[in-house]
Image: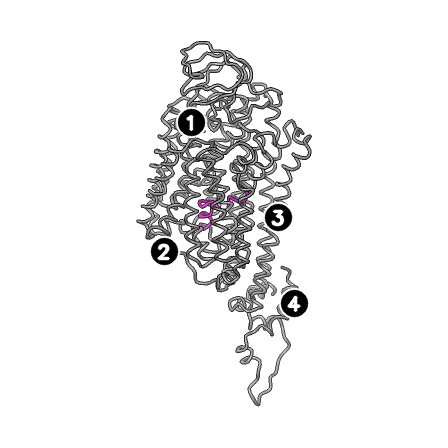
């Protein structure tokens, strides 16, 4: 999930999705009083309505945030699974369609043994390592977006 | 291999296991200690423990044995056993840890808010656990027989006693220590002898496996057949026979075997001249070394079998009960991911070895192709190739590693199966856990003695297929798809379990038929997994009202990082 997209979504979604009771108490001024509003800075708005509360109360906004996190993680996993399936699932087909490859030798060893008995393992570890970095980045982005205390501290 | 050294190897590993296990007794007091070691295990130790628990007799003995018998296609087994963790990492590890569930039934209950799904899951955990334990027990019999000539039931009895003592003494905490120790023991037990074997192979002129001939006896060899077998003789050969051949008893007489099948009786010794072609047992095809080294040239329908094996192993790993229970010992979801990557590295290092053993076995212990006991190749090689005191010592090391392999996997499975039995069938608590431990061990003990002997990796492969057809859809859809319903989950679990279970029963009890039907039953995953997924999705879509009411809260719980202060619901696993 990218930061700017998520914030744009927040601005659009905040007002309509807020429950009616809270909207009344905070938005409608009492008779005889005039509401004076300051410029809407990001920090003050975030402090009053932390997105974690939207998530806790399962508002439309909170749900939208959750869906974006789950979809980001799922997209990452599906993408890497597709690469894995293409490589792992592709090898038997390749050996079936191109019989010369079965007898191909690399450094004196049959190609199948070099790939399946050796190279595939470091590749798995590299994939796993890359996945962990990406998944943790998705979670950091989400935390930046959602947890205002955390985000404020990090944005100075 | 000398019996004394082999016994010393077995005794050392058993003693170390019990000793480390009982050390855990003093620190494990509460139920939580018993089930998940109170979640205080460090990542490297946890990863070693996962590796130690996962590397079963199928990895230590079976993979090399199947590679020796069937060649390059079987390299997919260790690849899939490792790759399964990559899929698990991407789809399951962090959300599963964040769910807070201790066992698969816990997860099912938390996600679907249904006791019915929990019960079906419990039954499947117990069945998969038993199916996985049975070949471990049989390997124990094989190891003890290879080393000491003890009857085949002795190994299973030994393993039952050691595991029972250990689990009853300390539960999971001691098991975690034992497992971590056993990963390194297994790696050493396989890698150190291999270094010496490869040196000896170089010294021997580094013979290759690219000849256009089937294996031949490198020297005059006496082969003793442990159990009656039917072997196929390719070219006429005159042997010295002691025992029964084709129904006639010989006593050291010269017998000429014509090409074709021959029945060799139990405990019969045949002495082959140097350079004679090795007769192959019925179900292992006799192929030239070149064919053996090539992929897609092994069993019938090898392309289908390869894909089915890939699917079963890559998707089945996440559904193994003893694998999942380990993830709850991570402190949080992030640690669960990092532990999994460490597990990938540890497994990758180990699985470089079985292929080399299989290849060396084809050069130096081809008689295993005749006795059919290819699972013994790792145990037999050091003594055969090196001989003398070095061979004996390394043989003892390998034997110790093999004992570690079936002990650790059986211990882990016992804890998982007993946990489920204790919680869901008995009343829960430490006393039920103890009673459940005995039940969890008794059934596979009986099965392993009663069932016919199959290649350990084949039976383990079937357990993977059942896990892939049941728990893989439940976990993947449960974690990523909000519209999964109770009815859908139940229908998918029951369909996948019934289809894969039928294939298992047919294959294990009677042996699969010839031809395509046989291939479909021996490697069922390629059709049972898609069917299970389709049923689970289809029935869920047809019953949209069955979506659990709290699914949104559960999604928060599964996917948000622990650093965020959000409401994750109040569900806790029962009685722990």
Magenta range? B313-328
Separation of marks 3 and 1 at Cα, in angstroms: 42 Å
Which chain letter goes with mark 1? B
Comparing marks 2 and 1, which lies closer to the viewer? 2
Q: Secondary structure at mark 3?
A: helix
Q: Residues within 10 Å of mark 1 (few under 14, many from 20)?
A: many
Image quadrant containing the C terminus of chain B: bottom left
In this rendering, is residue B298 above or below A50?
above
Confirm whether circles 3 and 4 share one chain: yes
Quadrant of residue B17 within the rendered picture: top left
Which chain letter goes with mark 2? B
Pick out the residue farthest to the top.
Answer: B253
Separation of marks 2 and 1 at Cα, in angstroms: 44 Å
- The label on residue A80 is 3
Separation of marks 3 and 2 at Cα, in angstroms: 38 Å
Please provide percent x and percent y for residue B55: 47, 38
Report the front residue among A38 and B546. B546
Q: Residues within 10 Å of mark 4 (few under 14, many from 20)?
A: few
Q: Is residue B316 magenta?
A: yes
Could you tell me what secondary structure mostly forms the magenta stretch?
Answer: helix
Q: Residue beneath label 4, please? A: A8
- The label on residue B575 is 2
Q: Residue beneath label 1, please? A: B396
Please provide percent x and percent y for residue B36: 41, 49
Image quadrant containing the N terminus of chain B: top left
Q: Secondary structure at mark 1?
A: helix
The answer to whether residue B189 shows anywhere in this view is: yes
Separation of marks 1 and 4 at Cα, in angstroms: 67 Å
């Amino acid at each position: 999930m990218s930061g700017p997209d998520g914030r744009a979504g927040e601005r659009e979604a905040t007002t309509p999705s807020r429950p009616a009771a809270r909207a009344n108490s905070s938005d409608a001024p009492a008779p005889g009083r005039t509401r004076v509003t300051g410029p809407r800075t990001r920090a003050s708005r975030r402090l009053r309505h932390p997105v974690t509360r939207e998530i806790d109360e399962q508002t439309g906004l909170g749900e939208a945030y959750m869906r974006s996190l789950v979809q980001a993680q799922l997209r990452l996993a599906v993408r890497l699974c597709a690469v894995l399936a293409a490589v792992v699932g592709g090898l038997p087909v390749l050996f079936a369609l191109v019989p010369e490859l079965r007898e191909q030798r690399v450094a004196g060893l049959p190609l199948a043994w070099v790939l399946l008995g050796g190279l595939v393992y470091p590749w798995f570890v590299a994939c796993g390592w890359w996945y962990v970095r990406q998944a943790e980045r998705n979670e950091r982005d989400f935390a930046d977006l959602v947890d205002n205390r955390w985000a404020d501290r990090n944005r100075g | 291999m000398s019996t004394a050294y082999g016994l010393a190897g077995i005794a050392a590993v058993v003693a170390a296991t019990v000793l480390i296990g009982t050390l855990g007794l003093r620190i494990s007091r509460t139920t939580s200690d018993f089930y998940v070691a109170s979640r205080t295990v460090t990542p490297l130790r946890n990863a070693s423990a996962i590796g130690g628990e996962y590397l079963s007799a199928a990895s230590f003995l079976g993979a090399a044995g199947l590679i020796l018998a069937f060649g390059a296609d079987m390299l997919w087994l260790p690849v899939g056993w490792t790759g399964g963790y990559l899929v698990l990492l991407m789809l399951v590890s962090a959300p599963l840890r964040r769910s807070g569930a201790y066992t698969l039934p816990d997860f099912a209950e938390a996600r679907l808010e249904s006791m019915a799904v929990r019960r079906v899951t419990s039954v499947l955990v117990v069945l998969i656990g038993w199916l996985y334990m049975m070949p471990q027990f049989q390997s124990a019999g094989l190891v003890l027989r290879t080393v000491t000539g003890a009857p085949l039931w002795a190994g299973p009895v030994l393993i039952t006693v050691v595991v029972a003592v250990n689990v009853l003494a300390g539960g999971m905490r001691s098991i975690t220590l034992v497992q971590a120790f056993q990963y390194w023991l297994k790696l050493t037990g396989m890698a150190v002898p291999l270094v010496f074997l490869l040196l000896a192979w170089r010294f021997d002129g580094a013979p290759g496996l690219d000849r256009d001939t089937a294996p031949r006896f490198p020297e005059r060899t006496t082969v003793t057949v442990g159990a009656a077998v039917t072997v196929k003789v390719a070219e006429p050969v005159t042997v010295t026979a002691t025992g029964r051949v084709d129904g006639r008893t010989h006593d050291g007489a010269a017998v000429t075997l014509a090409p074709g099948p021959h029945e060799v009786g139990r405990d019969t010794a045949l002495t082959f001249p140097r350079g004679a072609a090795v007769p192959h047992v019925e179900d292992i095809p006799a192929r030239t070394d070149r064919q053996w080294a090539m992929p897609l040239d092994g069993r019938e329908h090898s392309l289908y079998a390869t894909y089915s094996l890939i699917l079963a192993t890559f998707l089945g790993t996440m559904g193994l009960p003893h694998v999942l229970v380990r993830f709850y010992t991570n402190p949080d979801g992030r640690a669960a991911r990092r532990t999994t990557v460490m597990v990938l590295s540890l497994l990758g290092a180990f699985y470089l070895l079985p292929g080399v053993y299989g290849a060396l076995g084809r050069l130096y212990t081809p008689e295993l192709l005749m006795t059919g006991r290819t699972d013994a190749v790792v145990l037999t090689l050091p003594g055969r190739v090196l001989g003398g005191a070095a061979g004996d010592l390394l043989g003892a090391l390998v034997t110790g590693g093999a004992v570690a392999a079936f002990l650790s996997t059986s211990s882990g499975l016992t804890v998982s199966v007993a946990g489920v039995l204790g919680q869901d069938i008995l009343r829960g608590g430490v006393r039920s856990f103890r009673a459940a431990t005995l039940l969890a061990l008794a059934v596979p003990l009986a099965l392993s003695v009663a069932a016919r002997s199959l290649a350990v990796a084949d039976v383990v492969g079937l357990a993977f297929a059942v896990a892939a057809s049941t728990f893989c859809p439940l976990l993947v859809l449960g974690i990523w798809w909000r519209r999964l319903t109770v009815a859908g989950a139940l229908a998918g679990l029951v369909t996948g379990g019934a289809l894969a279970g039928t294939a298992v029963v047919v294959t294990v009890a009677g042996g699969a038929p010839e031809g395509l039907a046989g291939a479909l039953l021996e490697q069922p995953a390629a059709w049972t997994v898609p069917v299970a997924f389709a049923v689970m999705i289809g029935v869920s879509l047809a019953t949209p009202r069955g979506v659990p009411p709290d699914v949104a809260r559960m999604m928060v719980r599964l996917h948000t990082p622990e650093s965020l202060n959000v409401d994750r619901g109040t569900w806790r696993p029962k009685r722990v």
